Amino acid sequence: MADVHDKKTRSFNMSRIKGKNTKPEILVRQFLYKNGFRYRLNYKKLQGRPDIVLPKYKTVIFINGCFWHGHENCKDFVVPKTRTDWWIDKINQTKNRDLSTSTELESLGWKVYVIWECELKSDKREQVFKDLIVFLKEK
């Protein structure tokens, strides 16, 4: 099925999608800072440019959008009805890249923590943050 938008409209829509400083990222950063954790953002020296790096804890945190990273069994991940094969291929490439990045970082001694966008909804957020604190304090 063809795209429902013309090329110019689609390009504009896609250009509006942020890759940094998203609302989920800001929620996690505010929580960490409020709880005394200091971090670096989008650290270029590490593979995958992790969203948040906590050098003191040798931990990286990725905050993944459910759609863009293909969150399995999530209501926020719905494959588009147009250009379905293209989207499935794109999302699978992202998932493979995520796995490769995590494996590489772990082999370098980094702990990797992934937070999904849907986990930061108000009803789940408190538990996710508690789990994050436990993860950070583990040796």
Image (cartoon, grey):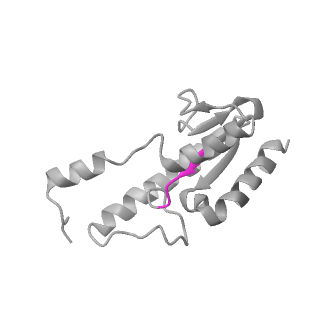
Q: Which of the 4 quarters of the picture holds residue 56?
A: top right
The structure residue drawn at horizontal position 38% and vertical position 60%, both measured from the top left corner, is 89
The structure residue drawn at horizontal position 65% and vertical position 32%, both measured from the top left corner, is 39
Residue 16 in the image, given as x and y percentages of width and height: 31, 47
The structure residue drawn at horizontal position 70% and vertical position 39%, both measured from the top left corner, is 34
Evaluate whether residue 100 shows in this view: no
> What secondary structure characterizes most of the magenta part?
strand
Residue 6 in the image, given as x and y percentages of width and height: 14, 58
Q: Report the front residue among 5 and 27.
A: 27
Which residues lie in the magenta part? 61-66
Q: Is 111 included in the stretch rendered in magenta?
A: no
Evaluate whether residue 60 shows in this view: yes
Quarter containing the N terminus: bottom left
Q: Report the front residue among 124 and 62.
A: 124
Relative to 63, is 32 above or below? above
Q: What is the count of numbered marks? A: 0
Quarter containing the C terminus: top right
